[in-house]
Amino acid sequence: MKQKRLIIRSVILLIMIGAVSYTFYSHYAEERGVVDQGDIAPNFRVQDPAGNILELEELRGNGVYVNFWATYCSFCRDKMKYMNEHYKEYEKLGVEVVNVNVDESTLRVERHQERHQLDFPLYIDRDMLVSNAYGVASLPTTFLIDENGNVIERQIGAKTEAQVIESFDRLIPGGN
């Protein structure tokens, strides 16, 4: 009788461990945002510090490198340095760089742009509406969007200069 109870309790314990493990895996280990590879990129509107509005839909026909960042993110700063070095070259090839700050002050974003001498425009995601819509949970997060508006890759974390260039190369219209 005691052995039968031990077996039943062990089976129940194993089932509970399996259920808890699956829950942790599905919520934490599997990092998938709301928007991911293979999706059509949802349209959004963001504003630069001067008040100019950019709508993603306006960039259709170009490859678009959408980078979510913050001034306090050291990986973001490194990545922006690499992007800035190659921005103009790839812009001529039809690649647009859209840097979306995650709701910091206009003054902070302007100072960041001046301090790091960034040539490309910086946009601010007020109230993190775009970040939340795209499922951005950590920074930097980048979405590579082809000329047809399809997300071809979702990237999370630090990147080397070579990785940034490789991403830009993938975004050249007609080059996929």
Image (spheres, rainbow, N blue to C red):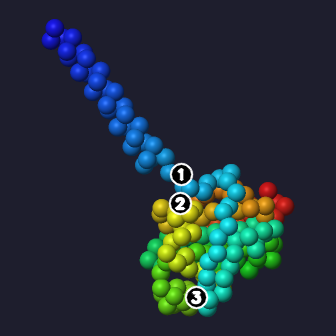
Say which label, 2 or 1, has the lower sequence index. Answer: 1
- Residue holding disc 1: 32
Which x, y percent locates residue 77?
Answer: 52, 76
Are dots 1 and 3 in contact, CB under 8 Å?
A: no
**Position of residue 165 in the picture relative to residue 116 (left or right):** right
Which numbered disc, 3 or 2, marks the residue that appears first in the sequence?
3
In this view of the protein, which residue sits in the foreground, 91 or 110? Answer: 110
Residue at the far top in the pictured view: 1
Q: Are marks 2 and 1 in contact (CB under 8 Å)?
A: yes
Image point 61% across, 91% down: which residue?
A: 50
Q: Amino acid at mark 3?
A: Pro
The picture quadrant where one finds residue 11 is: top left
Mark 2: amino acid? Gly
Q: Residue 68 appears at what percent x and percent y? A: 56, 70
Q: Rounded to the nearest whole Å, what is the CA distance between mark 1 and mark 3? A: 30 Å
In the picture of the structure, the residue carrying the numbered disc 2 is 135
* 10 Å crowding of disc 1: few (<14), some (14-19), many (20+): some
The alpha-carbon separation of the residues under discs 3 and 2 comes to: 24 Å
Does residue 85 show up? no
